[in-house]
């Protein structure tokens, strides 16, 4: 079983690099702090927890909904205001995963059960 990806058009391919143009898609994002490794592990656990069913179904809020694993999952360092001491002491990262094609709208996605989790 392949992991679902958003549709894209391949614009350029050279050795180990591809340049892609993606069709619009929705992402789920979690913000975490720590070193790159710590933030990646924590963020992935939060995302996995959400897609494996720790969420609230939009249509039936008393139920949860499992979501198929999708790709890509990305990690991006967040920048703080220039000159901020915060930028030197804490690393902020965003982990994102592309929503599966069968859930095209943010309004159809289940919400996280724990809104303090960083979603």
Image (cartoon, helix red, strand yellow):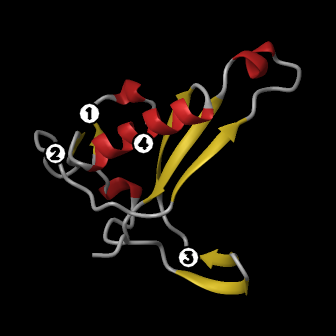
Q: Nearer the viewer, mark 1 or mark 4?
A: 4
* Horizontal side of residue 33 vs 55, given as left or right: right
Residue 74 in percent (x, y) is at 56, 53
Disc 2 from disc 3: Cα separation: 28 Å
Which quarter shows the N terminus? bottom left
Circle nearer the viewer, 4 or 3:
4
Q: CA distance from mark 1 to mark 3?
A: 29 Å
* SS at mark 4 in the image: helix
Residue 67: x and y in percent read: 26, 57
Mark positioned earlier in the residue sequence (2 or 3): 3
Examine the rendered structure and indicate whether residue 55 appears above or below residue 98: above
Residues at marks 2 and 1, CA–CA distance in whole angstroms = 9 Å
Q: Nearer the viewer, mark 4 or mark 2?
A: 4
The mark that comes first in sequence, 2 or 1, is 2
Residue 44: mark: 4
31 shown above or below 75: above
Residue that badge 2 annotates: 64
Estimate how packed mark 1 is, as few (under 14), some (14 to 19) or many (20 or more) residues with alpha carbons within 10 Å.
Answer: some
In terms of secondary structure, where does tag 1 sit?
Answer: loop
C-alpha span from label 4 to label 2: 19 Å
Marks 1 and 2: in contact by CB < 8 Å?
yes
Judging by the rendered image, the residue that carries numbered circle 3 is: 23
Dot 4 and dot 2 residues touching (CB under 8 Å): no
Instruction: Work out whether residue 83 or residue 43 is closer to the camera in this orientation and state it.
Output: 43
At x 44% / y 33%, what residue is drawn? 42
Q: Where does the image place residue 91, in percent across and percent down from the top left?
A: 66, 26
Q: Which residue is mark 1?
A: 113
Relative to 40, 49 lies left or right: left
Q: In whole angstroms, how far apart are the C-alphas of marks 1 and 4?
A: 16 Å
């Amino acid at each position: 079983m392949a992991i679902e990806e958003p549709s894209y058009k391949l614009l350029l391919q050279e050795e180990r690099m591809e340049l892609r143009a993606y069709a619009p898609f929705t992402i789920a994002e979690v913000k975490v702090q720590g070193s790159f490794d710590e933030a990646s592990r924590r963020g992935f656990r939060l995302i996995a927890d959400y897609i494996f069913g720790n969420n609230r179904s939009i249509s039936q809020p008393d139920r949860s909904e499992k979501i198929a694993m999708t790709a890509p999952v990305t990690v991006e360092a967040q920048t703080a205001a220039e000159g901020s001491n915060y930028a030197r002491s804490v690393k902020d990262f965003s982990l994102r995963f592309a929503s599966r094609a069968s859930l095209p709208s943010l309004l159809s996605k289940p919400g996280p059960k724990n809104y303090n989790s960083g979603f």
